[in-house]
């Protein structure tokens, strides 16, 4: 069974970008739980701590999504890789969202008190999220962040794959990365796992042969790079196009009409027109 077999006869897939990000702090268990029954699968990001724990956080630093600047124990530039898992666990990964309301959805929906009542969110291990997903039979897109220039550059793909196999989630996971050497390594380690190449810069002119060489079943281009012709070309070779980040209903409908398989969105409800 492949990742895509989880969506038999379903063409237009909705991926929760870092969870239910418009109304919960991104990449937290709260955001993932809020995504249940709202999305077809959840996208999340894996980074590594100093002591080699795979944790769920998008940025290389702790500053944007935690209260790290308020804790004198931590020093600039607040790199994730510079601290152990136990050290990072002391940080609050949710209060910033309540304070900033980055998508304006807390005020719009008058859910301040509802969100305030949610316990403080700490950083999660990949193992915790895999256990959660397994209990709900929930597919995941796991993005391995680029660990270049860190001690985990060579081993990150293997470490992530070992956890996926430990939880017997290989058929529930789509692995992706901007570092395409990572997904290439993953495919060698586990030929049956589905992989996707992320792209935010430029579409290669030989995109089909490039993806076929990687043995990728999907391509994840940034929205500004995505064209009708690209989607049509990839579909011809049975390679799915999943577009990030799509935050308008009009764009979502257009992409699905053009043949995109999935969109990654911050809005699982009340998506702007």
Image (spheres, helix red, strand yellow):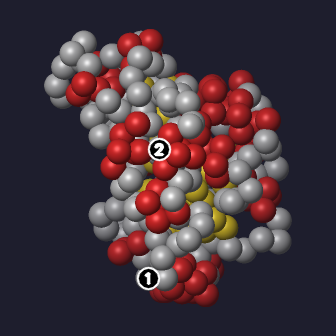
Can the viewer see residue 226? yes
- Callout 1 secondary element: loop
**Earlier along the polypeptide chain: callout 1 or callout 2?**
2
Q: Is residue 24 above or below residue 224?
A: above
Task: Give the left or right position of residue 149, taking residue 224 as reference.
Answer: left
Label 1 or label 2, whichever lies nearer to me, is: 2
Query: Where is mark 1, residue-wise?
Result: 227
Q: Residues within 10 Å of mark 2 (few under 14, many from 20)?
A: many
Residue at 19% x, 19% y is 75
Q: What element carries label 2?
A: loop
- How far across and how far down the image is residue 134, in percent? 76, 36
Q: Dot 1: few (<14), some (14–19), or many (≥20) neighbours within 10 Å?
A: some
Outermost residue toward the left in this view = 76
Which residue sits at x=61%, y=44%?
Answer: 32
Q: Position of residue 3 (x, y in %)?
A: 72, 52
Where on the picture, by quarter, is residue 31?
Answer: top right
Of residues 212 and 37, the one drawn nearer to the viewer in this rendering = 37
Q: Measured from the top left, where is residue 66 in percent x and y?
A: 35, 33
State the image quarter where residue 4 is shown: bottom right
Q: Which residue is drawn at 45% across and 19% down?
A: 89
* Residue for point 39% across, 23% down: 91
| C-alpha separation, residue under disc 1 versus residue under disc 2 | 31 Å
Q: Is residue 148 above or below residue 260?
A: above
* Residue on which the image places disc 2: 25
């Amino acid at each position: 069974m492949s990742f895509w077999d989880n969506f038999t006869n379903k063409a237009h897939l909705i991926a929760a970008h870092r969870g239910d990000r418009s109304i919960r702090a991104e990449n937290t268990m709260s955001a993932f739980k809020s995504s249940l029954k709202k999305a077809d699968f959840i996208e999340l990001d894996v980074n590594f701590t100093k002591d080699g724990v795979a944790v769920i956080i998008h940025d290389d630093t702790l500053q944007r999504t935690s209260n790290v600047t308020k804790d004198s124990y931590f020093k600039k530039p607040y790199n994730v890789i510079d601290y152990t898992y136990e050290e990072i666990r002391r940080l609050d990964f949710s209060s910033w969202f309540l304070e900033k309301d980055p998508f304006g959805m807390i005020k719009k929906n008058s859910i301040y008190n509802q969100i305030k009542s949610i316990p403080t969110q700490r950083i999660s291990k990949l193992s915790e999220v895999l256990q959660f997903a397994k209990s709900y039979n929930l597919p995941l897109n796991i993005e391995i962040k680029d660990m270049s220039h860190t001690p985990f550059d060579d081993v990150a793909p293997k470490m992530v794959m070992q956890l996926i196999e430990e939880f017997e989630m290989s058929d529930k996971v789509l692995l992706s990365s901007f570092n395409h050497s990572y997904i290439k390594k993953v495919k060698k380690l586990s030929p049956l796992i589905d992989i996707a190449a992320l792209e935010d810069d430029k579409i290669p002119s030989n995109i089909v042969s490039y993806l076929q060489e990687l043995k990728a079943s999907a391509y994840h281009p940034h929205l500004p790079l995505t064209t009708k012709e690209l989607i049509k070309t990839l579909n011809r070779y049975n390679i799915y196009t999943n577009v990030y980040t799509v935050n308008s209903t009009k764009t979502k409908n257009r992409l699905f009409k053009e043949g995109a398989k999935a969109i990654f969105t911050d809005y699982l409800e009340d998506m702007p027109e």
